[in-house]
Amino acid sequence: STPGPRDVDVVVIGAGQAGLSTAWALARQGFAPGTGFVVLDGEEAPGGAWRHRWPSLTLGTTHRVHDLPGLPFTPDDDSAPAVESVPAYFTEYEQRFGLPVLRPVRVAAVRRGADHRFRVETDRGAWTARAVVNATGTWTRPFVPRYPGQERFRGRQLHTVDYRSAEEFRGQHVVVVGGGASATQLLAEISRVTSTTWVTRRPPVWRAGPFDADAGRRAVAMVEEAVREGRRPGSVVGVTGLPTSTPYIREGLDRGVLQRLPMFDRITPGGVAWDAAGGVESRFVAADVILWATGFRAAVGHLAPLRLRDPGRGFRMEGTQVAGEPRLHLVGYGPSASTIGANRAGQAAARVLRRELRPGAPLPR
Ligand code: FAD
């Protein structure tokens, strides 16, 4: 089992951008690392979801990882795989600030325990805490929609989390499903070695101008409003559009590989099919591979015992606090589902926790 106290003020779950920025800020707010708060992370090593990105994903113009608080991220080489450079940065970060990250520790359930404390149950025993910051991200919950005939497809189906390299599809026809950044990026990559078909539910929205700070603020405000009202927020790309200034998108448009078809109706053993409707003819595309670039859901199954969610809806939020359970914070979701957003949310959560818990003070009754 892991050493150290099991009864703390705050348990942070997850050590990605959101969990680490929370941990840094908790220490600054007077919570003692190790005795006042711990971070429980399911990974074998630092890096959060960045440990699992496909090897061709690099940091440059399209992918930017915002600095964690207190230590700038200065990769020597923009062309280095993110799967290496970001975990290296997180490793340095955890060491530099002595952050009390315990791993691998997988949280199975969070329950209301005795004395107004949460009981955090894991594969390495239980912790209790006055407050919990959930920063478990989405990577461990890839989402694949259901279509008729899917289980009889003879080819290969995979989600972006399983994607490694375009080479493995050489000579096969690949149907890429999804309208976001991952879909367009993987299409641009795969279409260099083999034939592809792109399908999306809605027509893509191309954005010609640069993505400036104003556009960013508007996008975040829209997502925040959705979350306050308990609606499921859409993806950031859904709000901002796909930037045609990005080299791979511009180049994909030039080569004609970003021509999209509407969503198919059925999957057959040999491909995907559209039924005739509204004057549009039926259609069939033979496929060897269906690549689902269809996003993620929040990895929050372990919070189910708290019964905070209305069926079919998200959590209702007030800032980073869950409405109805203000000692539970969620960081890294909705308006904070980016490296910059996660960063801010973690620090905001720590400020609220200091105000409400006054580190070390007895629990108000
Ligand atoms: P994560 O990095 O996923 O960290 C969550 C941690 O929690 C993980 O270590 C996980 O193992 C752990 N965990 C999960 N469940 C449990 C459990 N039950 N018990 C214990 N531990 C658990 N954003 C940007 O700002 N710039 C980009 O360029 C960018 N590119 C992206 C590219 C891709 C392909 C994807 C999918 C996303 C990208 N994003 C980008 C979004 C960005 O990655 C995320 O918003 C941010 O990194 C999420 O950080 P996080 O801390 O919330 O989650």
Image: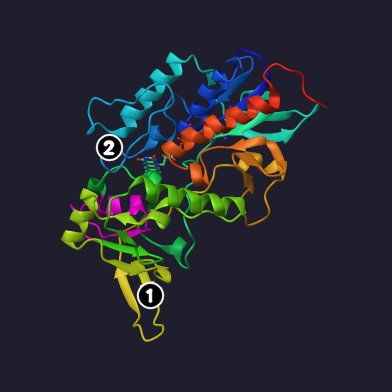
Label 2 lies in ligand 1 vicinity (Cβ under 8 Å): no
Q: Which residues are magenta?
A: 169-195
Q: Is residue 198 left or right of residue 363?
A: left
Q: Is residue 171 magenta?
A: yes
Q: Is residue 37 magenta?
A: no
Residue 194 seen in the figure: no
- Coordinates of residue 136 in the picture (x, y in percent): 53, 36
Q: Amino acid at mark 2?
A: Thr
Q: Amino acid at mark 1?
A: Trp
- Mark 2 vs mark 1, CA separation in Å: 36 Å
Closer to viewer: mark 2 or mark 1:
2
- Coordinates of residue 359 in the picture (x, y in percent): 67, 19
At horizontal 62% and vertical 36% (from top left) the residue drawn is: 329
Color scheme of the displayed model: rainbow
Looking at the image, how many numbered discs can be counted on the residues?
Answer: 2
Q: Which mark, by number, is residue 58? A: 2
Q: Nearer the viewer, residue 197 or 32?
A: 32
Residue 211 seen in the figure: yes
**Which element is circle 2 on?**
loop
Q: Which residue is mark 1?
A: 274
The answer to which quarter of the image holds residue 279 is bottom left
